[in-house]
Image (cartoon, coloured by chain):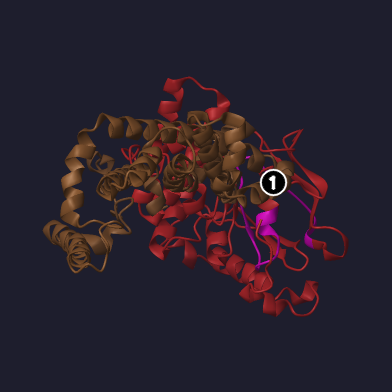
Chain colours: A red, B brown
Amino acid sequence: MDLHVEGVKKVYGDGPTARLALDETSFTVESGQFISIVGPSGCGKSTLLMMMAGLLKPTAGGIRLGSTPISGPPPGVAVVFQDYGRSLFPWMTVGKNLSMAAAADKLPKAEVARRVDEALTAVDLAGTQALYPWQMSGGMQQRVAIARALVVEPTVMLMDEPLAAVDAQTRADLEDLVLALRDRYDMTVAMVTHDIDEAVYVADRVIVLAAHPGRLIADIPVDLGRRDQLTTKAEPEFVKRRAEVFTLVRRPAATSSAGSDAELDGRPSELKA
Amino acid sequence: MTAASTTTRPRQQVPPGSSRAVTAAQLSRTQRILLGILGTGSLIALWQLGASTGVIPPSALPGPAVVAAALPGVLTSGEFLGALGDTLLTWLIALALGSAAGILIGLVTSAIPFLRRPSMVVVNVARAVPATALLPIAILMFGLATEMKVAIAFWAILWPIIINTSYGVLGTEPLRLDAARSMRWPWWRRQVYVTLPSALPSILTGVRVATGTALVVVIAAELLGARSGVGTFLRLYQQALRPDIVYAAVIVVGLLGALLYTVLVRLERRAVGWRASA
């Protein structure tokens, strides 16, 4: 199912303290596509993703999944949050964390068990059901969080900086893992990231946002074929797209008011959706 | 531990609940026992010194030997054991009622946004009234029997438990609630599987503290009027000028209180072991 973002706008607060987090933004994610959303701090990328997840209401505009408008978390859409430590349930075992993800779907027990097994196998964590998340390393915990999203066999997976909290090696592994999972589960994926290399490496399309106010400034197709950590990043297409996105994220001066360079450090970001 | 039964051997973290025990664990078990004996022994020695030099008049505090001699008599006296049973039962009832009511009120008032502020005002006003100050009213309402003691102890622990429960509920990690919402859990399931477990450490701390408070208040109510219980026993033998029996009874109650506290700390650690590393 295509995901349509139509004239979505988000204002936090009201009156004189109101702050425009994301100005009118429209784009469509085609079924099966992998898009990444990049931009400097305060560009509203997380806000956008949370609205796509139905966790945050747009101030104006709307989002449709196929023909169904999203008014709350829709079935078939799974979310992976940035901070696995704060999004997994530490009082539940890994197995329970996963099986509870399907609680709303009212599936037969055996089916839930099968899906839990499959999801854990898919993230290479088979046999860890009895562990508690806090007994695992950060990379493993984030894989548990990803597996939890897979249990509902989602058609759309939304990821909010899912790899920001893990080390570089783990991160490269997880990038490939997420790509493999997209094929295995035949999902549409939208991933927010602040890492430009990562954005270009994983996605079929890069949506670039600018900050203050957050808005869409570019929609860049990436034509890379099969990814490989060793060779992809040396391909001319990767280098070209990376430079393109880099320029847009670093120097959106052509399309924005003054002072945007200061935003790169992320200091003015009061926004945390 | 569950970790051992699986094929993957993860990076092991500090076992739950042991963060505070780390320094204590550096001492061997024997060393810890010896140090405990040394502390208690010094106290008893000082006590003996005070008694034999006459600094402490025996009518106020008889020497340790005299009190120790009174212990077997106290421990085998049906009168004392009956009073002790009475106190413990009262304490248990008050604790159960106070915890149940406090947790329930705390959960409801903090889970429903528009109830938060008004209920916090009520709680803060009510908890400022010391339980023992309400004794005359409680006696008027319930007489001198067990109900009165339960009512006073209930009042004393209800408010702190409500506060601890609210504190725990409001401290729930918002990202976990978002995760639960994204999984399309209905309100009640979010409360039961996210909010309640998040609040549990704080709730259990409240109950543990309430355990001590309730015992103190029950005995105070007995000292100040109630017809039965350890407090009544103490008052009786104080008036009979038998300080040795009074101290022996106080020691027994003190040891019992310490034991109950230890058991509760253990239970708490077991219930919320995940908290240490989460």
Magenta includes B131? Answer: no
Horizontal and vertical percent position of residue A200: 57, 61
Determine the secondary structure under disc 1. helix
Q: Is A166 located above or below residue B70 in the figure?
A: below
Judging by the rendered image, the residue that carries numbered circle 1 is: B122
User: Which residue sits at x=54%, y=55%?
Assistant: A82
Q: Nearer the viewer, residue A3 or B39?
A: B39
Instruction: Provide residue B10's location: percent of width, then percent of height.
Output: 29, 50
> At 53% from the left edge and 61% from the top edge, which residue is drawn?
A198
| Residue extent of the magenta highlight | A20-47
The amino acid type of the residue labelled 1 equals Val
Q: Specify whether residue A26 is painted magenta.
A: yes
Residue placed most toward the observer, A3 or B274 = B274
Image quadrant holding the C terminus of chain A, namely bottom right
Q: Dot 1 surroundings within 10 Å: few (below 14), some, or many (20 or more)?
A: few
Left or right? Give the position of A101 relative to A33: left
| Figure quadrant of the N terminus of chain A | top right
Residue at 67%, 58% (x, y): give it.
Answer: A45
